[in-house]
Amino acid sequence: MRKTPPATLNLLIITILVWLASIAFPARFGIDLTRYLGLHYWQSDAFLPTQLVTYMFMHDTSSMWHIFCNMFGVWMFGRTLESLWGAKKFIFFYFFAGIGAGIVQELTWMIDVAPLVRDFDAAISSGSGESLSGYQHLLIQGDITQATATDLLYLRNQLLSRFVTVGASGALFGVLLAFGWLFPQASLYMLFIPIPIPARIFVGIYAVIELLSGISGAGDGVAHFAHLGGMLFGAILLFIWKKQNKLY
């Protein structure tokens, strides 16, 4: 770790500290950091533009697996890119890919919740929930068809607030793409497969897995399209730098 370049090292330290705080704050101070720092749907009352940055430092607090995998990946690939690019260029790339991943996640949510938003907005405009009987299962108690416009507006906001994502995975997938682009022949190993794989193929395999998982709606709680968004925005920036002869 003493040889880890400063930007990568600071990313690791800050992310781990935020993860520890997100565990301690709810019990200690009654503050749910996920509500303020996790990325929420843009039409939710809980959304803040700054969440497009802060969500990268938040991780699942129910186990160490989420943060361990992400930080191990940032350490393994990020230090190489930072050594090549320097701290400022690497940090810019990291946040560009991470913010891009967040934007793609917002677009994915827009597609997913479009029918719900449309139906609730129509019901709110009419002042009655009679047309929303198909959403009755979303209520713990009460009859949604008897809800007033004020009740429906509150319920709509509550439902939209449930959409939240956390983690540095989007930025990490951008970093992974950059590593595969710049070091295509580097040998990498996939978990439980003791066969060296060229980095460019390794990255391609991961991209296909994420695409298929996203299309199939895996239901695993993973933001697969956000991962692809990190790769997409990372690729855009790499293309720009290549044209400007700033890639290396």
Image (cartoon, grey):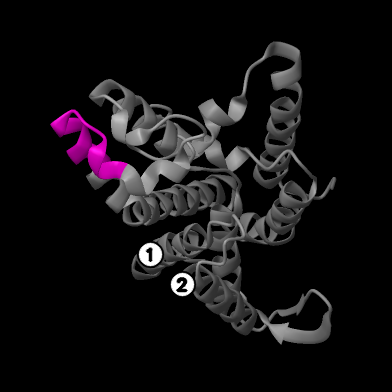
Q: What stretch is highlighted in magenta?
A: 120-132
Residue 60, image x and y in percent? 69, 42
Viewer-proximal residue among 99 and 148:
148
Q: Is residue 132 left or right of residue 228?
A: left
Label 1 sits on what residue type? Ile
Outermost residue on the top side: it is 29
The residue drawn where x is 74% and y is 56% is: 69
- Main SS, magenta region, reads helix
- Circle count: 2
The residue drawn where x is 84% and y is 78% is: 192
Label 2 sits on what residue type? Ile
Nearer the N terminus, badge 2 or badge 1?
2
Residue 64, image x and y in percent? 80, 46
Viewer-proximal residue among 244 and 139:
139
Q: Can you identify the residue that label 1 sits on? A: 236
Is 63 placed above or below 215 here?
Answer: above
Distance from label 2 to label 1 (Cα)?
22 Å
Q: Can you identify the residue that label 2 sits on? A: 215
Q: In this view, does 137 lie to the left or right of 188?
A: left
